[in-house]
Image (cartoon, rainbow, N blue to C red):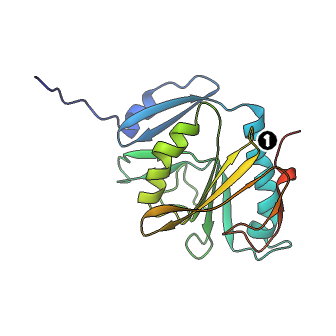
Amino acid sequence: MVQFAMKRATYADLLAVAPKDGVNLELIDGEIYSFNRPAIPHTAAASQLSMLVGPPFRYGRGGPGGWVLLDEPELHFGPRSDPHTVLIPDLGGWRRERMPETPGTPAIYLAPDWVCEVLSPSTALHDRKRKMKVYAKEEVSFLWLIDPILRSLETYRLEDGAWRSVAVFGEDEKIRAEPFEAIELDLADIWAR
């Protein structure tokens, strides 16, 4: 049997792929993944969550502040000159003590403290199988998975390099979930109606 070495895709390869409108690209360990832009329930859930968590944690209005929260940040993992992994979570958050100010660059090289992925039928397996592994490897402390179709929120905490399921919430529950347990979230406000 003859084996051929496959060329691993680089960040330059990712940039060379001309994305069509409505396509997202990610790079994980030298492999490029392409996904159609999400449907409105996905976008609405991410937008609503950002609007609910932003004021108390980004700005300190009705909450403790102390966070940098970004919608769809481009995360680069690996060498700055040629990252082997490029991910775009739906939401990312950094504690201010780790990221005192938002960088003026197109990408962020510092792993977030929290990420949220909104699951779509076309991305759910990718988010769970590939991206969760990368986030654990890069020592992201907290991960949320939102399913706007099932109307559920799963929360995870990184412990000893592995994800530990903390809680699963659903429907119209009023919840407190780490790392944002200082405020109560009404899940009914997240689901697109």
Locate the C terminus and report the quarter of the image it occupies. Answer: top right
Q: Which residue is mark 1?
A: 44
> Which residue does the image show at 55% across and 72% down from the upper left?
98
Q: Position of residue 172 (x, y in %)?
A: 85, 53
Front residue of this view, candidates 6 and 167: 167
For the residue marked with disc 1, what is the amino acid? Ala
State whether residue 182 is above or below residue 168.
Answer: below
Examine the rendered structure and indicate whether residue 78 appears above or below residue 141: above
Viewed as shown, does residue 192 lie left or right of 50? right
Q: Quadrant of residue 29?
A: top left
Q: Position of residue 66 (x, y in %)?
A: 69, 74
In the picture as drawn, the residue positioned furthest to the left comes out as 1
Q: Residue at x 42, y 65 (%)?
A: 161
Direction from residue 169 to residue 173 in the image, left or right: right
49 and 110: which is toward the camera: 49
Q: Is residue 3 above or below residue 82?
A: above
